[in-house]
Amino acid sequence: MVDDKKNENGRETRENIINQNSPEILTNSIYTPAFLRTQIGKLMRVEFLIGTNNLVDRIGYLQEVGASYILLRSVESDTITFCDIYSIKFITISGGGMYGGGNNRYHYY
């Protein structure tokens, strides 16, 4: 279910509302989209397989998850990247939520 609203700038925004009528792929955490929905707001490194042997990665905060896509907000430029969920091979999720900080042994720089 999609709820259309207007923000203070007059731009239309869409809010995905998950309820008992939503598809299982978005509600049951055995599926990738449902699991990733539990990680919204966290810093992550997402690696994509492009072609047969080319890995490309993107780092950002998980903004939104759909049935076939994720939205990542870039740390450097504050832009949003629309990513195909089916080409994702690996996701490294930061536990602390801080970019390269804290006691996190995995640094993204």
Image (spheres, rainbow, N blue to C red):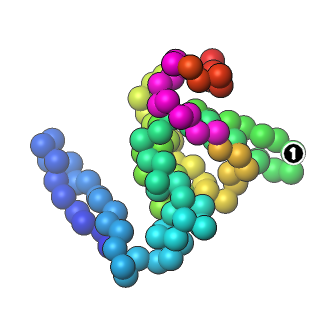
Please say if 43 is above or below 34.
Answer: above
Closer to the camera in the image, 15 or 13: 15
- Residue 1 lies in quadrant: bottom left
Please say if 55 is above or below 20.
Answer: above
**Residue drawn at (56%, 20%) of the image:** 103
**Residue drawn at (34%, 63%) of the image:** 16
Q: Secondary structure at mark 1?
A: loop
- Residue 68 lies in quadrant: bottom right
Residue 56 shown left or right of residue 5 in the figure: right
Residue 53 shown left or right of residue 64 in the figure: right
Q: Is residue 76 visible?
A: yes
Residue 53 is situated, as x and y percent measured from the top left of the image, at: 87, 45
**Residue drawn at (24%, 66%) of the image:** 3
Closer to the camera in the image, 11 or 34: 34
Q: Is residue 94 magenta?
A: yes
Among all residues in the image, which is located at the extreme front?
A: 103
Q: Is residue 90 magenta?
A: no
Majority secondary structure in the magenta region: loop
**Label 1 neighbour load within 10 Å: few <14, some 14-19, many 20+:** few
Which segment is the magenta one? 92-102
Among all residues in the image, which is located at the extreme right?
A: 53
**How many marks are shown on the rendered structure?**
1
Closer to the camera in the image, 30 or 62: 30
- Residue 109 lies in quadrant: top right
Residue 10 is situated, as x and y percent measured from the top left of the image, at: 14, 47
Please say if 98 is above or below 8.
Answer: above
Q: Is residue 68 visible?
A: no
Residue 69 is situated, as x and y percent measured from the top left of the image, at: 54, 57
**Residue drawn at (68%, 51%) of the image:** 88
Among all residues in the image, which is located at the extreme bottom?
A: 21
| Amino acid type of the residue tagged 1 in the rendering | Asn
Q: Which residue is mark 1?
A: 53
